[in-house]
Image (cartoon, helix red, strand yellow):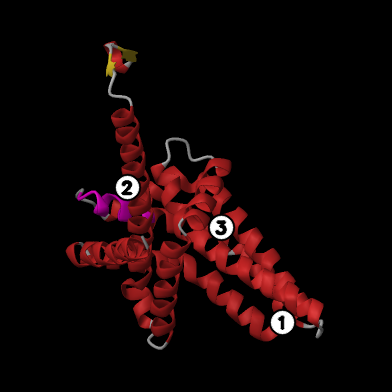
């Protein structure tokens, strides 16, 4: 089972790399647009942290959601279309921004508020300097890891669910992250490695790394949905095999012989 999970995790990465290769120019262009829209306030968050400390930086981080959320969901719209093999254009990016702006603000806003609360607690317990503080710091750090694991599935579900309401998206994201911890761990660690390596060559961030991460996130979500459907089909097949005296009636109903 562990090997099967690893295969799925690396399959999602390989599919994402193929997608980026096949639609490289489109994804790089959309990545550049995302960079122009999203990065000013994210960069401001970094400098606010350096100049004024963590609390002003957290405030700027919350403000950054305003441009970041619709730009990110626009990039996910492109990723979804690419994963389905549909022809896409840059205008689909902007159409996605307009169509999914409100659910993106709700989802990304709620996630960012949670992230800020986690960061506040980490900052608080860092300064306690005793065993109790160390234990609580460890718990909040673990929650931070889970929180970023949820982020992998959060935006794709805005597009993949029939109704993109916040409660359903949050529940399904938690179920994916906690229900498939090894898959999520492998994907998150590999993504973190890509981000760390990118930090040494910042221009890569604007040239396509964000698009790769988004495409990877979409493929990872689709992979888990596919796995869930396969499990459901296998369970139904096993149930049918255990009840050979039943047959389907009209309109898919099941009736005994």
| Residue that badge 1 annotates | 52
Q: Position of residue 4 (x, y in %)?
A: 31, 61
Most extreme residue toward the bottom is 200
Q: Earlier in the sequence, mark 3 or mark 1?
A: 1
In the depicted view, which residue is nearer to us: 121 or 185?
Answer: 185
Looking at the rendered structure, the secondary structure element under dot 2 is helix
| Relative horizontal placement of residue 187, taking residue 28 as reference (left or right) | right
Between discs 1 and 2, the one toward the N terminus: 1
Residue 87 location (% of width, % of height): 19, 50
Q: Is residue 101 left or right of residue 128?
A: left
Q: Quadrant of the N terminus?
A: bottom left
190 displayed left or right of 167: left
Residue located 32% across and 47% down the image: 226
**Separation of disc 3 and disc 1 at Cα?**
22 Å
For the residue labelled by badge 1, is the local secondary structure a helix, a strand or a loop? helix
Which of label 1 and label 2 is nearer to you?
A: 2
What is the magenta range? 76-85
Real-space CA distance between mark 2 and mark 3, rounded to the nearest whole angstrom: 32 Å
Across and down, in percent, residue 208 comes to 32, 71
Residue 93 visible in the snapshot: no
Horizontal and vertical percent position of residue 133: 79, 78
Quarter the C terminus occupies: top left
Q: Is residue 176 magenta?
A: no
Residue drawn 56% across and 64% down?
146
Q: CA distance from mark 1 to mark 2?
A: 46 Å
Residue at figure coordinates x 55%, y 55% from the top left: 108
The answer to which of 152 and 66 lies nearer the viewer is: 152
Up the image or down, 162 lies above or below 28; here it is: above
* Numbered disc 3: secondary structure: helix
Q: Quadrant of residue 197?
A: bottom left
Residue designated by label 3? 66
Q: Which residue is mark 2?
A: 226
């Amino acid at each position: 089972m562990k090997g099967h999970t690893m295969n799925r995790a690396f399959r999602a990465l390989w599919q994402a790399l193929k997608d980026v290769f096949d639609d490289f120019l489109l994804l790089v262009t959309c990545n550049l647009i995302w960079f122009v829209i999203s990065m000013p306030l994210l960069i401001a968050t970094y400098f606010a942290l350096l100049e004024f400390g963590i609390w002003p930086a957290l405030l700027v981080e919350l403000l950054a959601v305003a441009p970041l959320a619709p730009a990110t969901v626009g990039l996910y719209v492109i990723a979804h279309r690419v994963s389905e093999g549909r022809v896409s254009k840059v205008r689909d990016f902007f159409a996605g921004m307009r169509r999914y702006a409100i659910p993106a603000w709700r989802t990304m806003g709620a996630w960012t508020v949670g992230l800020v609360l986690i960061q506040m607690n980490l900052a608080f317990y860092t300064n306690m300097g005793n065993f109790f503080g160390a234990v609580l710091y460890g718990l909040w750090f673990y929650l931070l890891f889970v929180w970023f694991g949820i982020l992998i599935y959060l935006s794709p579900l805005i597009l993949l669910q029939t109704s993109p309401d916040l409660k359903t998206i949050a529940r399904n994201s938690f179920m994916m992250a906690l229900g498939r911890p090894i898959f999520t761990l492998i994907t998150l660690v590999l993504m973190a490695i890509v981000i760390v390596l990118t930090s040494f060559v910042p221009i890569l961030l604007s040239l396509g790394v964000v698009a790769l991460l988004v495409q990877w996130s979409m493929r990872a979500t689709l992979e888990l949905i596919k796995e869930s459907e396969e499990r459901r089909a296998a369970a139904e097949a096993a149930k049918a095999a255990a009840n050979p005296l039943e047959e389907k009636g009209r309109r898919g109903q099941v009736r005994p012989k």
